[in-house]
Image (cartoon, helix red, strand yellow):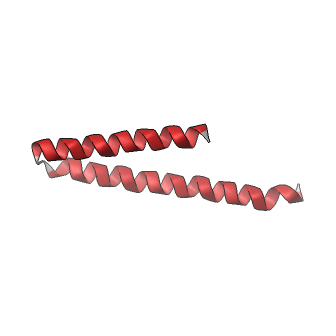
Amino acid sequence: MLVIRLFAVLALIGIGGSIVAWILTGNPKYRRWAWNCFRTGLVVLLVFLALFALERVFVPFA
C-alpha cells in the first residue's frame, strides 16, 4: 500500500505542477503533460486494484 500512496502523491505533484505551469505560461504542452500523468496514474491504479482482486480470488486455493 505504501507504493500506491507514494505513486499517488507523485502523480498529484506532477499533475498539479503541470497545471500551475500551464496557467502561468499558457503553453498547452503542460496541459497535455497533466492529462498524460492523470491517465497513467489511473491505469497504474487500476492494475494494482486488479492484482489485489486476483490475490483475493486465488489465495484461498493455495
Position above or below: 4 against 49? above
Q: Is residue 60 left or right of residue 31?
A: right
Residue 14 in the image, given as x and y percentages of width and height: 34, 41
Position above or below: 13 against 38? above
Q: Residue at x 22, y 52 (%)?
A: 31
Q: How many marks?
A: 0
Question: Dividing the image into 4 quarters, which one contains the C terminus?
Answer: bottom right
Residue 59 in the image, given as x and y percentages of width and height: 82, 55
Residue 45 in the image, given as x and y percentages of width and height: 52, 53
Quadrant assignment, res 2: top right
Q: Residue at x 47, y 44 (%)?
A: 8
Q: Residue at x 62, y 42 (%)?
A: 1
Q: Is residue 25 left or right of residue 48?
A: left
Among all residues in the image, which is located at the extreme bottom? 57
Compare residues 13 and 32 and report the one nearer the observer.
13
Q: Residue at x 41, y 44 (%)?
A: 11
